[in-house]
Image (cartoon, rainbow, N blue to C red):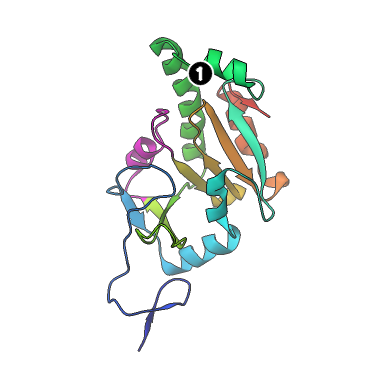
Amino acid sequence: MVKTDYRGVPRDDPEPRRGSRLPLALGSTMNLRCLSEAEQRRLHSIFPRIVELNEHEPSHGYEQLAISVFDHRLSGEEALLLLGQVPPEEQSRRNALLQTFMDSLLRETDVVTFHFSSDDPDDTALTFAGFTSAGAAREYFRHSGDQRYVAVCAAFRAVVYEGYDDTNHLFFLDRDQIGRPIELAKMAGLYVW
């Protein structure tokens, strides 16, 4: 019997490959758990070509909204003023707003992430992963500004990318499904544009 991965591609190795090259600089995969092959297939069918979102450009049916501490897209001059040398207490306030949104999202629905299946930078195959506990998920999605997480929310057909500029990017496939994430962002004191 030939073993296959979740996409039906034959593989020679007896164990699934476990790569560490994540979509962005996410850090340790220690608290991640593998999802079943059926769940992998389900998520791949819901989120076609999700890997292309790493360029932060909507494509192939995805639309994008910003979830931000700012009420508009910053100009270059505004970015220099508002993002350069932010006082620690102000950065903590911004991080707390974005963290409140993620905590609400985690309470509301099942959130997973993904990592690349290989260390080869040319290999774009990816694996979706869940978390070993609610605490592990909260720590993984902790907004700090110095890492980049990707939150995949199948219930909303949406993907949230953490940004470095106190703005997260919400990519979605169905505008009718994102009302609740938008509401959670606004309840956290964030702007959606």
Identify residue for label 1.
83
- Who's the residue at 47% across and 60% down the image? 124
- 141 drawn magenta: yes
Work out which residue is located at the far bottom of the displayed protein and give it: 1
Residue 96: give x, y in percent of width and height.
Answer: 45, 21
* Tag 1: amino acid: Leu
Question: Splitting the image into 4 quarters, where does residue 63 fall?
Answer: top right
* Boundaries of the magenta span: 131-148
Question: Splitting the image into 4 quarters, where does residue 36 fall?
Answer: bottom left
- Who's the residue at 31% across and 49% down the image? 29
Residue 25: give x, y in percent of width and height.
Answer: 38, 42
- 4 drawn magenta: no
Q: Nearer the viewer, residue 186 or 79?
A: 79
Q: Is residue 183 above or below residue 125?
A: above
- Who's the residue at 65% across and 25% down the image? 73
Label 1 sits on a secondary structure element that is helix
- Who's the residue at 61% across and 47% down the image? 156
Q: Nearer the viewer, residue 96 or 171?
A: 171
**Numbered circles on residues, count:** 1
> From the viewer's perspective, is 152 left or right of 138?
right
Q: Is residue 114 above or below residue 138?
A: below
